[in-house]
Amino acid sequence: MKQIALDIGLDPGPTLESFYTGPNEAAQKHLQARCAEDTSAAMGAPVPTYLWGSAGCGKTHLLKAVQVALRERGASVGWLDATVLTPPQFNEHWAAVLMDDVQAYNEVQQHAAFNWFVNAQTSHCWVLSAGPLPPADLKLRDDLRTRLGWGHIFHLGILSEPERRAVLRQAADARGVFLGDEVMDYMLTRFSRDLGSLIELLNLLDGYALQTKRGITIPLIKSMMENT
């Protein structure tokens, strides 16, 4: 059966606590500890962190969760991904710079990322970045690739199918939604299997079920796809 790939992302406002760790507990604990540290200049320049892994392993979730955690502490952060066509100048008041999907940076973005790295060291600013490959394998300018590879590096693994099922079940229970095994099977075989898309699919199904006053069943999923 042909999979349907939905162009949908993660829940708004992801948190480090809502990240289902699976094989990635070490990375989660590292980020939680870093977000809890003093961000003052007296602590010195923190060692950069780089996360890598295939699509759906949770890289963007973790970067956005760190952004949320730091902002809740009153800290400001810089954000750069491939959609930021005009990167801002480095801000010395940033507590961290977060750089996602570094493999997709164009020349302007690579220049900005390198500049952020250099300024981060003098401003005692943490650098957290992410991409699909180890730093050495990225097709980026040498000086940027070298800096991405300096520091803490975590390889994020994909959740197994039983782990994905457990997360979906937990998310459904939290919403007061019942997902039968047949519905779970249908979701995992017909749609994009990365966890972020599955959770967003559950959100859409929950909303559609409430709107139509029906339970979440395979016919309801088909109806939603035909009417959206």
Image (cartoon, grey):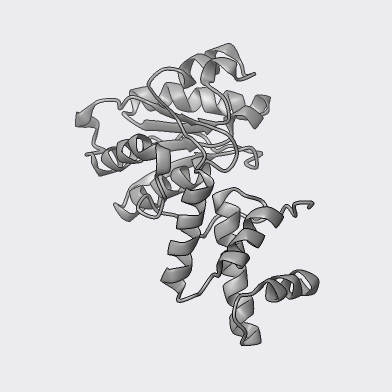
Name the foreground residue: 191 vs 123. 191
In which quadrant is the C terminus drawn? bottom right
Residue at left 56%, top 65%? 181
Instruction: Name the side, left or right, on which 120 lies relative to 137.
Output: left
Q: Find the residue positioned furthest to the left.
A: 42
Residue at left 49%, top 14%? 146
Instruction: Name the side, left or right, on which 218 lies relative to 59.
Output: right
Residue at left 38%, top 35%? 92
**Residue 227 image point, x, y percent:** 78, 75
Look at the image and tell me whether residue 17 can be seen. Answer: yes
Residue at left 46%, top 37%? 98
Instruction: Name the side, left or right, on which 87 lies relative to 20.
Output: right
| Location of residue 204 with respect to 36 vertically, above or below | below
Q: Find the residue positioned furthest to the front.
A: 181
**Residue 102 image point, x, y percent:** 58, 30
| Location of residue 18 with respect to 36 vertically, above or below | below
Look at the image and tell me whether residue 105 can be seen. Answer: no
**Residue 176 image point, x, y percent:** 45, 76
| Location of residue 102 with respect to 219 vertically, above or below | above
| Location of residue 40 with respect to 15 vertically, above or below | above
